[in-house]
Image: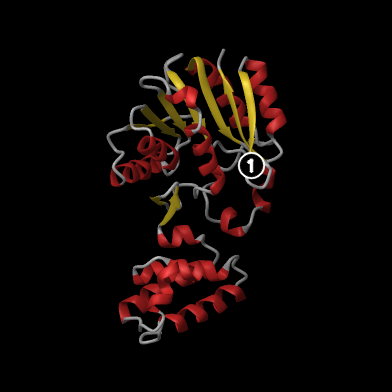
């Protein structure tokens, strides 16, 4: 591979990934190669005739082997993009997805929340910190806290926040959901909680099942055990007229709406993603 041109290496990598039945093989190959040569994937065409150096070739071989084995490309290159920010990720945390970008966008679009002088928000199950960081950078006038059960996730989230200039805007703590949060102290709760039914974990694609943390996926027998606990805690932690925003599975909206009505939320609304699937449920405390 040393001395081979970028385009030659790319085509060989695509072939290897396709043989291993890795989804979106060309995209994966471009992302890994772009990471190695120090450019965005769409800029590879500008370097197509450049020969790889020996260190580049060796690094690419190692990273490609991980991708061929099914490891998600975001873990392979150590980062992903979320709301325009480069977020570092590894096997300590769930990989942020476009559905969660939509959750953040729904929060940002809630004018009632942002008209408040200094709203207090909690990102529950923060993982990589992507939601709290994106919100803090977009709306710096608010107070943010972010919780996660995993101390390893909190460690990475802190690193991401510091690197992106939001380290002094977010208080990170290791906690189970909203444990330790004072009653009626928040203007909003936002969360992408675990919502995959436990019995379906083994049926997930191997790059999710074998690499991403199950604690960030497993929502209990029906997928809603964690959601139900969070809905009840949020009802107590959020102030009057405050908001709760939850990412959900596409078949869970009806049950989550019923939960929120049961504990007393009002103005409940289901937001669909770009494919028309139910994706976010939001509700206001009376």
> Which residue position holds label 1?
196
- Residue drawn at 47 percent across, 33 percent down: 108
Q: How is the image coloured?
A: secondary structure
Decide: is 249 above or below 171. Answer: below
Residue 21 visible within the image: yes
Q: Position of residue 123 (x, y in %)?
A: 45, 32
- Residue drawn at 57 percent across, 43 percent down: 217
Q: Count residues near mark 1 (Cα–Cα under 10 Å), then give few for <14, some for 14-19, many for 20+.
A: many
- Residue drawn at 42 percent across, 49 percent down: 84
Q: Position of residue 202 (x, y in %)?
A: 66, 51
Residue 273 horizontal side relative to residue 254, left or right: left
| Quadrant holding the N terminus | bottom left
Decide: is 226 above or below 67. Answer: above
Q: Position of residue 139 (x, y in %)?
A: 38, 33
Q: Position of residue 120 (x, y in %)?
A: 40, 23
- Residue drawn at 59 percent across, 53 percent down: 209
Tally of numbered tags: 1
Decide: is 42 above or below 142. Answer: below
- The residue most toward the bottom is 3
SS category of the residue bearing label 1: loop
Decide: is 35 above or below 87. Answer: below
| Quadrant holding the C terminus | top right
Q: Quadrant of residue 222?
A: top right
- Using the image as rendered, state which of residue 160 and residue 225 is in the foreground: 160
Residue 215 visible within the image: no
- Using the image as rendered, state which of residue 252 and residue 156 is in the foreground: 252
């Amino acid at each position: 591979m040393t001395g081979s041109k970028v385009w030659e290496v790319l085509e060989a990598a695509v072939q290897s990934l396709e043989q291993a039945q890795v989804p979106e093989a060309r995209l994966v190959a471009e992302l890994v190669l772009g990471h190695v040569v120090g450019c965005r994937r769409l800029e590879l065409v500008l370097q197509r005739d450049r020969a790889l150096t020996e260190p580049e070739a060796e690094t690419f071989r190692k990273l490609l082997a991980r991708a061929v084995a099914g490891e998600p490309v975001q873990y392979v290159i150590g980062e992903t993009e979320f709301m325009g920010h480069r977020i570092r990720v590894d096997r300590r945390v769930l990989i942020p997805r476009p559905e969660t970008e939509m959750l953040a966008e729904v929060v940002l679009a809630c004018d009632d929340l942002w008209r408040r002088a200094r709203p207090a928000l909690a990102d529950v199950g923060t993982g990589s910190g992507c939601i709290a960081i994106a919100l803090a950078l977009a709306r710096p006038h608010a107070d943010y806290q972010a919780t996660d059960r995993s101390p390893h996730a909190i460690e990475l989230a802190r690193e991401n926040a510091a690197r992106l200039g939001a380290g002094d805007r977010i208080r990170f703590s290791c906690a189970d959901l909203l444990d330790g949060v004072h009653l009626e102290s928040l203007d909003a709760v936002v969360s992408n909680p675990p919502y995959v039914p436990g019995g379906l974990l083994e049926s997930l694609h191997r790059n999710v099942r074998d690499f991403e943390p199950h604690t960030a996926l497993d929502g209990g027998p029906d997928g809603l055990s964690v959601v139900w606990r969070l809905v009840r805690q949020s009802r107590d932690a959020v102030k009057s007229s405050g908001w709760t925003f939850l990412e959900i599975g596409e078949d869970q909206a009806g049950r989550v709406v019923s939960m929120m009505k049961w504990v007393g939320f009002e103005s409940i609304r289901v937001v669909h993603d770009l494919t028309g699937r139910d994706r976010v449920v939001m509700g206001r405390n009376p």
